[in-house]
Image: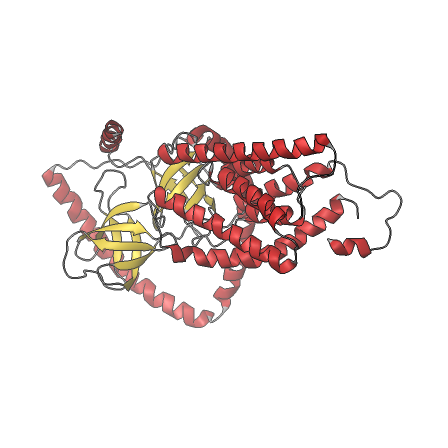
């Protein structure tokens, strides 16, 4: 958050919380876990992929949230917890990290709108990969059925990004 | 140009470079793992079972809370217009009593006829009973988490049903919980019959909580809105005469139906043995030979 720089100088005794380095990764696992233990039965599958949303929200907020390869084990945990085909999130999440690394080199400036647009593209990629894998596994549904969950995920991104930014300020003790 | 170089420190530069290489490695590993799970879906059974065992008890505990809260709201709703509802229920009860007597008579007749034909009744003891505690949320696939696992005798491939109708079949099982492929999943195909008339049809999920019904014989669309579809027992996995779904809309050569056992409001469900275990095993062996 740029606005954090405008805040009054910090108090003595404030600073990063212990294990601040691992907080982003832990929040991603917690987000996957929320979806895994949510005691509701969904018959439409329109819930956003919370783990992926938190992952790209962190990565769009900071480029040093974690080394890019951490996405692979985080994706593996997500696959295990949410029951997706093993390897799907590993591949998609790592690819998202690499795409954002490249995007970091290409973009001259960043803003809320650009970040939201990048998140939209990544969420579309995620939904499309899920859809294609389901198709390979004999469960082909028409592509328009992923548009509703995609819209919900895109609209959920700013909320997730807000909570991620708050968590980032808490972990750094600002 | 915005560069990715983190200053002049060689250590930091190498760190960034190796992290990039590791990420590409991670991507490749992910693709290989995905390919394995697509080619042989049973490859990760044990790891998946462990993950299920870790999360399902939490979901089960929380499910009690949502059921209670949901019950409060529907309970309050029942008081609305109670007198009118009461009269209606009394009328329905009268009708039901008549039907029960008729059904008992038919059952008796049926037993006598079966005895005459010397058909053996298959004993259908449930393997285990449990609750539907959770589900898949964010994919085109429709799974549910069921609160009984291999410790209770649940095995992959067994059919799951509730008093209201068919729910699906087990596809992953941990020792405490298992994952059920719901009837509404696209990959779930159930041989069925229309209750009125007994015409054979095929039920396939649509991934959004409804199922697609197609008649096996080409011709006029046999469905009517409100028709109930039941399992036919063909194929040997699902037992016959279990209600599946009710037709809600017709399309050009089939119909769209709503499963009768809504996994969202089902409290208890039972796992049964495959109807004809021999036939299912034979089919599996045949499939392996083909591969």
Q: What x and y, as percent, mark residue A104?
A: 62, 47
> Which quadrant would the C terminus of chain B be assigned to in this image?
top left
The residue drawn where x is 84% and y is 44% is A14
| In this view, B19 is above or below B247 | above
Q: What x and y, as percent, mark residue B118?
A: 12, 36
For residue A139, say whether it is visible: yes
Outermost front residue: B1
The residue drawn where x is 60% and y is 43% is A101
In terms of depth relative to the viewer, which is nearer, B161 or B172? B172
Q: What x and y, as percent, mark residue B176?
A: 48, 33
Q: What x and y, as percent, mark residue A44?
A: 43, 54
| In this view, A42 is above or below B20 | below
For residue A34, say whether it is visible: no
Q: Is residue B288 left or right of residue A108?
A: left
In terms of depth relative to the viewer, which is nearer, A14 or B270? A14
Outermost right residue: A12
Outermost left residue: B116
Q: Quadrant of residue B123?
A: top left
Q: Is residue B191 left or right of residue B44?
A: left
In terms of depth relative to the viewer, which is nearer, A47 or B108? A47
The residue drawn where x is 21% and y is 56% is B102
Q: Is residue B71 left or right of residue A165?
A: left
């Amino acid at each position: 958050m740029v606005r954090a720089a405008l805040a009054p100088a910090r108090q003595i005794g404030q600073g990063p919380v212990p294990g601040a380095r691992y907080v982003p990764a832990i929040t991603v696992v917690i987000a996957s876990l929320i979806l895994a233990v949510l005691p509701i039965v969904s018959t439409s599958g329109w819930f956003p992929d919370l783990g992926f949303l938190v992952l790209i929200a962190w990565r769009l907020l900071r480029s040093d949230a974690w080394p890019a390869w951490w996405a692979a084990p985080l994706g593996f945990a997500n696959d295990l917890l949410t029951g997706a085909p093993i390897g799907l999130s590993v591949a998609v999440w790592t690819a998202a990290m690499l795409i954002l690394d490249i995007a970091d080199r290409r973009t001259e400036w960043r803003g809320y709108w650009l970040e939201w647009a990048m998140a939209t593209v990544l969420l579309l990629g995620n939904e499309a990969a899920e859809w294609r894998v389901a198709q390979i596994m004999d469960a082909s549904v028409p592509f328009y059925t992923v548009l509703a969950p995609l819209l919900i995920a895109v609209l959920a991104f700013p909320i997730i990004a807000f909570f991620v930014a708050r968590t980032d300020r808490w972990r750094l003790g600002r | 140009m915005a560069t990715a170089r983190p200053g002049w420190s060689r250590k930091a530069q190498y760190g960034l470079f190796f992290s990039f290489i590791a990420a590409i490695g991670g991507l490749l590993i992910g693709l290989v793992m995905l390919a394995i799970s697509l080619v042989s879906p049973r490859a990760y059974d044990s790891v998946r079972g462990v993950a299920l065992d870790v999360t399902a008890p939490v979901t089960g505990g929380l499910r009690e809370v949502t059921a209670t809260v949901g019950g409060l709201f529907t309970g309050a709703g029942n008081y609305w217009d109670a007198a009118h509802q009461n009269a209606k229920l009394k009328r329905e009860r009268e009708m039901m009593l008549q039907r029960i007597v008729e059904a008992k008579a038919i059952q008796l007749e049926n037993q006598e006829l079966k005895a005459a034909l010397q058909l053996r009744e298959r004993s259908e003891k449930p393997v285990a009973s449990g609750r539907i505690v959770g589900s898949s949320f964010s994919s085109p696939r429709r799974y549910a988490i069921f609160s009984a696992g291999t410790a209770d005798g649940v095995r992959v491939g067994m059919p799951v049903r509730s008093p209201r109708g068919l729910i699906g079949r087990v596809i992953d099982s941990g020792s405490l919980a298992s994952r059920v492929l719901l009837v509404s999943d696209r990959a779930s195909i159930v041989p069925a019959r229309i209750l009125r008339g007994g015409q054979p049809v095929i039920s396939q999920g649509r991934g959004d909580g409804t199922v697609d019904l197609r008649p096996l014989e080409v011709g006029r669309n046999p469905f009517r809105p409100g028709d109930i579809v039941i399992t036919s027992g063909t194929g040997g996995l699902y037992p016959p005469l279990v209600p599946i779904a009710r037709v809600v809309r017709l399309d050009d050569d089939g119909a769209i139906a709503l499963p009768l056992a809504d996994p969202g409001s089902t409290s208890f469900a039972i796992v049964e043995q495959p109807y004809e275990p021999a036939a299912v095993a034979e089919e599996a062996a045949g499939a392996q030979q083909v591969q």
